[in-house]
Amino acid sequence: MMSAAMIEDKEIFVKDLIAVPENAEILNRRYPDRVTVATIENAGHTVLNEKPDEVAKCIAEYLRASDI
């Protein structure tokens, strides 16, 4: 996943090195009944601050699909 930032009207992208997407896929393969992976494009490690509407949509979809 990438995070976008604006510096002097130029958009740059920074890869999230803290929580790499590959780790989520490993967990999903290891525990498929307990892990759901949602990808939010152009968001980095602070996805809750960067894309709050998209996070809320993912959570709502997960809850609708589950028995919670």
Image: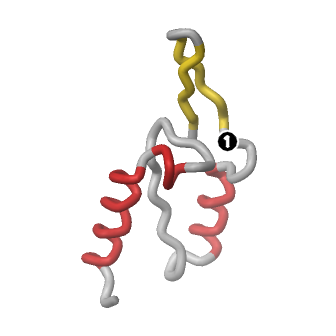
Q: Which residue is mark 1?
A: 16
Give the vertical position of 12 relative to 60 (above or below).
Answer: above
Residue lying farthest right? 18
Give the vertical position of 11 relative to 28 (above or below).
Answer: above
How many numbered circles are shown?
Answer: 1
Q: 18 and 6: which one is in front?
A: 6
Give the vertical position of 58 relative to 50 (above or below).
Answer: below
Residue at image position (37%, 68%) is 59
SS class, disc 1:
loop
Q: Could you tell whether 62 is left or right of 12 in the image?
A: left
User: What amino acid type is highlighted by mark number 1?
Assistant: Asp
Q: Position of residue 10 (x, y in %)?
A: 54, 11
Residue lying farthest left? 64
Residue lying farthest front? 8
Q: Could you tell whether 25 is left or right of 55 in the image?
A: right
Query: How many C-alpha atoms fall within 10 Å of the one at disc 1: few (<14), some, or many (≥20)?
Result: some
Residue at image position (34%, 89%) is 68
Q: Position of residue 7 (x, y in %)?
A: 59, 16
Residue at image position (29%, 67%) is 61
Residue at image position (57%, 10%) is 8
Give the vertical position of 1 relative to 9 (above or below).
Answer: below
Which coloring applies here? secondary structure
Quadrant assignment for the N terminus = top right
Q: 5 and 27: which one is in front?
A: 5
Q: Position of residue 33 (x, y in %)?
A: 50, 81
Q: 55 and 36: which one is in front?
A: 55
Location of residue 44 by image quarter: top right
